[in-house]
Image (cartoon, rainbow, N blue to C red):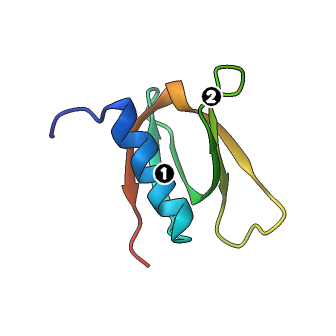
């Protein structure tokens, strides 16, 4: 396994994926995996979350705390 992702790498990849409607797999610090398309990334200290739209869930959004994210990877279509 490689080096852990930095906060900047996580934000950058989430921003890229969201801008290209590309799904990502997020692994959290407790080893939970969440897959979805980033709809917004809020780095403000009061929010500090990414909002994901799961595949097939047009009306659903999942919020994940940026501080709980250990790794992000693009999901192949």
- Please tell me whether mark 2 sits on a helix, a strand or a loop: loop
Q: Quadrant of the N terminus?
A: top left
Figure disc tally: 2
Residue identifier under label 2: 48
- Please tell me whether mark 1 sits on a helix, a strand or a loop: helix
Left or right, 25 with respect to 55, comes to left
| Disc sitting over residue 49 in the figure | none
Residue 49, above or below 23:
above
Check disc 1: other Cα within 10 Å, few if <14, some if 14-19, many if 20+: many
Instruction: Measuring from the top left, give residue 10's x and y in whole percent.
Output: 40, 41
Residue lying furthest right in this view? 59
In-front residue for pair 32/52: 52
Residue found at x 54% / y 65%: 19
Q: Quadrant of residue 2?
A: top left
Instruction: Measuring from the top left, give residue 25's x and y in whole percent.
Output: 45, 54
Residue identifier under label 1: 14
Left or right, 16 with respect to 41, comes to left
Residue found at x 44% / y 27%: 29
Residue found at x 29% / y 36%: 5
Q: CA distance from mark 2 to mark 1?
A: 13 Å
In-front residue for pair 72/47: 47
Left or right, 11 with respect to 66, comes to left
Q: Are marks 2 and 1 in contact (CB under 8 Å)?
A: no
Instruction: Measuring from the top left, give residue 62's x and y in whole percent.
Output: 71, 47
């Amino acid at each position: 396994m490689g080096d852990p992702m930095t906060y900047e790498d996580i934000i950058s990849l989430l921003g890229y994926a969201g801008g290209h409607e590309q799904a990502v797999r997020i692994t959290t610090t407790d080893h939970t995996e969440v897959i979805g398309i980033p709809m917004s990334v809020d780095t403000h200290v009061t929010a500090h979350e990414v909002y994901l739209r799961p595949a097939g869930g047009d009306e659903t959004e999942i919020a994940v705390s940026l501080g709980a994210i250990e790794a992000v990877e693009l999901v192949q279509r």
